Amino acid sequence: MLFYSKPCLVIANDTKVGDSWSVVVGKGPFSDTARYTVDLNDTLENFTGGTYTALRITKTTRSGIVRRWFAKGKGIVKETKEDNVPSQQPVMMK
């Protein structure tokens, strides 16, 4: 589990496409820099047929990429993840 040593601002009210920022997470050899980029303003359809206008924010770290769509007044309305961990091939033992 990852714990932040101080509060981490994920999104501010005036965030707009093109904004970016970085936050150092963890300590010592386990530290990493999370880089956040506001990629696009998107329209998403929800399961009831309604739509949200949402900012897509991409967080990049050594371990992978997380994309979250934030709708004003709603919070996170969609999330995708891509791991940077290489897949391992099974090894046949003789």
Image (cartoon, rainbow, N blue to C red):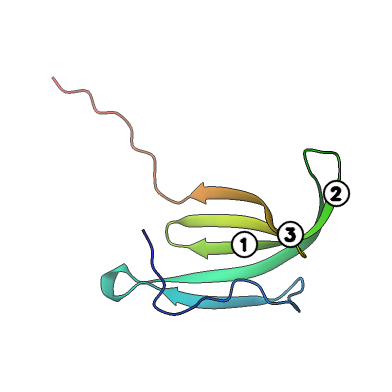
Q: Is residue 9 above or below residue 92?
A: below
Label 2 secondary element: strand
In this rendering, the label closer to the viewer, 3 or 2: 3
The N terminus lies in quadrant: bottom left
Q: Farthest residue in the top direction?
A: 94
Q: Are marks 3 and 2 in contact (CB under 8 Å)?
A: no
Residue ID for mark 2? 51
Give me the C-alpha separation between circle 2 and circle 1: 21 Å
Q: Residue 35: x and y, percent?
A: 54, 70
Q: Earlier in the sequence, mark 1 or mark 3?
A: 1
Q: What residue is drawn where x is 86% and y is 39%? A: 49
Q: Earlier in the sequence, mark 3 or mark 2?
A: 2
Type of amino acid at the residue the image marks with label 2: Thr
For residue 74, which numbered disc appears in the image? 3
* Left or right of 43, for residue 34: left
Q: Earlier in the sequence, mark 2 or mark 1?
A: 2
Q: Residues within 10 Å of mark 1 (few under 14, many from 20)?
A: many
Comparing 78 with 42, the one in front is 78
